Image (cartoon, rainbow, N blue to C red):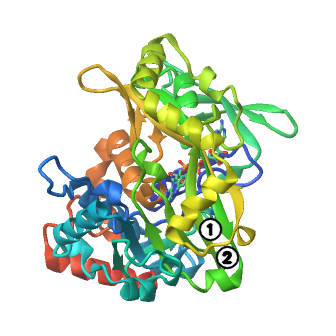
Amino acid sequence: MSATLGTLLSQLEPTWKIAIFERLGDVARESSGPWNNAGTGHAALCELNYTPERPDGSIDITNAVKVNEQFQVSRQFWAYLVGAGLLPEPKSFISPVPHMSFVWGADNVAYLKKRYDALKDHPLFAGLEYSEDASVIRSWAPLLIPGRRKDQPIAATRIPAGTDVDFGSLTHTLIDGLVDNGASLKLNHRITGLRRDKKSGLWHLKVKHDVGLTALEVTARFVFVGAGGNALNLLQRSGIREIRGYGGFPISGQFLRTDDPAVVARHAAKVYGKASVGAPPMSVPHLDTRVIDGSSSLLFGPYAGFSTKYLKTGSYLDLFAALRWHNLGTFVGAGLKNLPLVWYLVTEVLSTRGKRFRALQQFAPTAEAKDWHLITAGQRVQIMKRDANGKAAIQFGTEVVAGADGTIAGLLGASPGASTAVPIMLDVLAKCFPSKLDAWRPKLVEMVPSYGGTLSENEKKAEATIARTAKALAIHP
Ligand SMILES: Cc1cc2nc3c(=O)[nH]c(=O)nc-3n(C[C@H](O)[C@H](O)[C@H](O)COP(=O)(O)OP(=O)(O)OC[C@H]3O[C@@H](n4cnc5c(N)ncnc54)[C@H](O)[C@@H]3O)c2cc1C
């Protein structure tokens, strides 16, 4: 997120000084690290949680269209950066990997067919295919069929326009570009406090070198708290009123991974299933091709769990450190309201290796335990806040929280995530620099031609934009 915002700002205001402080020894070692997330270019092409079934049985595609629009914004910005020579060969961070949804059971098959009918004629979902035929599905993803009961009703959709994104590689390249253009990057430097001087309006940041333990103080006109799961804690320390009442619900995750070339060669897709009843939307199981550093692996999961850490490398005290008088009610209310979720996560933590493996075998019935190993993913800190009716709730999205005067902003929440970094950071610009937007508009439109509008409203424009960015990013099938 910080790398994206820094890159946008350096294009809009090349003379501004940018300083980046990272508490670890390298960037992208938390959620943005390639093995800490699933690398799905989230465009709602295959994720069923974005197309819920309404009580009358029809399919609501509102969220799917919104997420796809957001991903098109990221694609346009990345295509601009590649064209301007600011990002290297696109294959270093983005790969074409077809996206599939796969379900079993008569009810789920009926749902998937309705979803297909609702999306197939939409310009952002052009090319979506549907099948209930095992031989067709096998030709799309060979691991899914062998070993499966012949009488089991199954169905799948496939869209070749899907992507796998190495957000770690992307982050490194963007940060390198910023440093080459004069930004300073201080690794092993932890922000421990931030305070705004009322007289000068400047922010004073307390920074600690985590190795030498030396302390320094820096001043800034604008601060972006791009601290991932730790953003809640730092925004609280800034003292801005806007963060009052917010809490953070941490969800940990694990994946099964195989690098065995014989297994990897039999699967070239991201295949998303249906979440089990009571499971949070981000724990939808999926069997994914990952392309990292030029080689392919398979990932299955995530297996969600509960840990009180807000970062993978954080402390078990993180959750307790976020408790304040003003958010105590939110924590208690949201916790009590979501007891089934807490129970689900606890049972997931206690789940045996055998049970976890059986979840993979529901996708790939002939999978063998010897070929797979467990890896620990990043932490997702879901937003806890009061809804419009004042009721505490957990929110499975992201939200930019900015100070009233626009001199500080941070990002809470985790989904859809890194795929939508560009529209989220454009939101930060709109919230924090409203008086600059008119002057910036021509450059913003040059970088993201659909800026300020949507692609759905114009079929020809959608088609042309998708084709142009696919070519620039070398992801056309
Ligand atoms: C299991 C899992 C699967 C996911 N799958 C996907 C996916 O398929 N597709 C997708 O688009 N998104 C996915 N996401 C979400 C995506 O990974 C995140 O939204 C994104 O990486 C967040 O980026 P960020 O820059 O906000 O945070 P991070 O990448 O976590 O970076 C925050 C940085 O801030 C540093 N930091 C924290 N505190 C301090 C401090 N006090 N001082 C200095 N530095 C500090 C951290 O060390 C870290 O480097 C997934 C996430 C998880 C956990």
**Residue at 51% over, 32% down:** 342
Q: Amino acid at mark 1?
A: Ser
The image quarter in which residue 103 lies: bottom left
Residue 293's disc number:
2
- The CA span between labels 2 and 1 is 8 Å
Question: With 362 as the anchor, is 252 left or right in this view?
Answer: right
Identify the secondary structure beneath mark 1: helix
Q: Residues within 10 Å of mark 1 (few under 14, many from 20)?
A: many
The answer to whether 247 is drawn above or below residue 100 in the figure is above
- Location of the C terminus by quadrant is bottom left
Q: Amino acid at mark 2?
A: Asp
- Marks 2/1 in contact by CB < 8 Å: the verdict is yes
Relative depth, front residue between 206 and 304: 304
**Residue at 67% over, 48% down:** 352
Name the N-terminal-most of marks 2 and 1. Answer: 1
Measured as percent of width and height from the top left, residue 101 is found at: 37, 69
Please name which of the two marks, 2 or 1, marks the residue nearer to the observer: 2
Relative depth, front residue between 401 and 430: 401
Residue that carries the numbered disc 1 in the rendered image: 169
